[in-house]
Image (cartoon, rainbow, N blue to C red):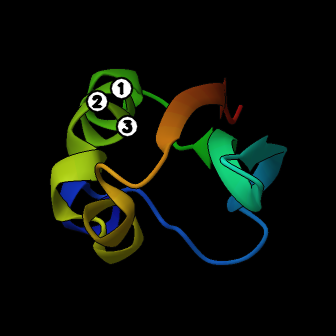
Amino acid sequence: MLEARGIPAFPDKLWTEVEGDIEDVDRVIRITRLRVKYHLKIPPGKRAEADRSIEVHERKCPAAVTLRGALAIEYSAEIEEEA
């Protein structure tokens, strides 16, 4: 999605941090919530495209689609425009 909008996504431009909550649900240990934080370095003038990609990615992300309904996922992003 980023590459289609002219934003490179190779390793030094995009990375994530993921935290999860593990709880006892009806005596079964389950992951109940994930917090995903994207770190993104973007070319100048691409902020709107980056924001839009983050906003809509959940509908196209295979992992998010697979987990939908199984646990809560919260997304955030730290976007840095390169000089």
Q: Is residue 54 left or right of residue 71?
A: left
Gap in angstroms between the C-alphas marked 1 and 3: 5 Å
Separation of residues labelled 1 and 2 (CA atoms): 6 Å
Q: Residue 50 location, x and y as percent?
A: 38, 36
Question: Which residue carries the number 1 mark?
Answer: 51
Instruction: Check whether the beta carbons of the residues at disc 1 and disc 3 lie within 8 A of each other.
Output: yes
**40 vs 35, nearest the viewer:** 35
Across and down, in percent, residue 75 comes to 53, 32
Numbered circle sitting on residue 54: 3
- SS at mark 2? helix
53 relative to 17 in the view: left or right:
left
Q: Nearer the viewer, mark 1 or mark 2?
A: 2
Residue placed under numbered mark 2 in the picture:
55
Q: Amino acid at mark 2?
A: Glu
Q: Residues within 10 Å of mark 1 (few under 14, many from 20)?
A: few
The answer to whether marks 2 and 3 mark residues whose Cβ atoms lie closer than 8 Å is yes
Q: What quarter of the picture does the N terminus occupy?
A: bottom left
Q: Is residue 39 visible?
A: no
Q: Residue at x 28, y 30 (%)?
A: 55
The image quadrant that residue 76 belongs to is: top right
